[in-house]
Image (cartoon, helix red, strand yellow):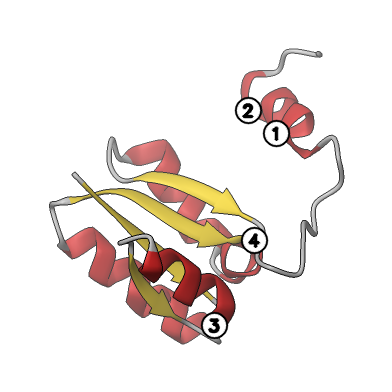
């Protein structure tokens, strides 16, 4: 099982490549969708890492993958500029997904 990164930030991309992660730079929605389709076409990709801004560019598609496919696991990370989500993002995500108040 391999990991792949889709990033809108070159510094994040270079850092992950140095760590051995296959990485693609996507600066607009069309490039993001193309990179997602490429990742889905590769059976060996088990973890798909995306930056927060990339996630925002293709939110509907990535949420559909999370809900309807076993793989790849979608992991959202901040880029070198830091987190754009608020501090309670994970708690809010669980509340929306499961309906449990934490």
In percent of width and height, residue 94 lies at 68, 25
Do the residues bearing badges 1 and 4 touch, measured as CB atoms within 8 Å? no
Query: How many angstroms separate mark 1 from mark 4 (CA)?
Result: 14 Å
Expressed as whole percent of the image width and height from the top left, the position of residue 53 reads 65, 68
Asked where in the image residue 1 lies, by quadrant, the reply is top left
Mark 2 vs mark 3, foreground winner is 3
Mark on residue 10? 3
Camera-near label (3 vs 4) is 3
Query: Image point 55% across, 86% down: which residue?
Result: 28
Q: Position of residue 8 (x, y in %)?
A: 56, 78
Q: Which mark is residue 52?
A: 4
Instruction: Tell me whether the residue at label 1 lies in contact with that at label 2, contact meaning CB atoms closer than 8 angstroms.
Output: yes
**Numbered mark located on residue 93 in the image:** 1
Q: Secondary structure at mark 1?
A: helix
For the residues labelled 2 and 3, say whether their Cβ atoms are less than 8 Å apart.
no
Which of the numbered marks, if any, corresponds to residue 102?
none
How many numbered marks, from 0 up?
A: 4
Q: Percent from the top left, x then y, of residue 77?
A: 60, 53
Q: Which residue is mark 2?
A: 97
Q: Residue at the left extreme?
A: 43
Looking at the rendering, in which quadrant would you find the C terminus?
Answer: top right
Earlier in the chain: of badge 4 and badge 2, it is 4
How far is disc 1 from disc 2 in space, using C-alphas? 6 Å
Looking at the rendered image, the disc whose residue lies closer to the viewer, 1 or 3, is 3
The secondary structure type at the circle numbered 2 is helix
Side of 38 where 16 appears, left or right: right
- In 3D space, how far apart are the residues under numbered discs 4 and 2 (Cα atoms)? 18 Å
| Marks 1 and 3, the one that precedes in the sequence | 3
């Amino acid at each position: 099982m391999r990991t792949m990164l889709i990033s809108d930030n070159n510094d994040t991309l270079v850092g992950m490549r140095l760590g051995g992660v296959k990485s693609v730079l996507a600066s607009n929605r069309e490039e993001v969708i193309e990179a997602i389709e490429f990742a889905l076409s590769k059976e060996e990709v088990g973890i798909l890492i995306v930056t927060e801004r990339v996630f925002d560019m293709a939110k509907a598609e990535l949420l559909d993958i999370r809900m309807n496919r076993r793989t790849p696991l979608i992991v959202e990370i901040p880029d070198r500029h830091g987190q754009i989500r608020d501090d309670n993002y994970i708690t809010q995500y669980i509340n929306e997904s499961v309906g449990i108040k934490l």
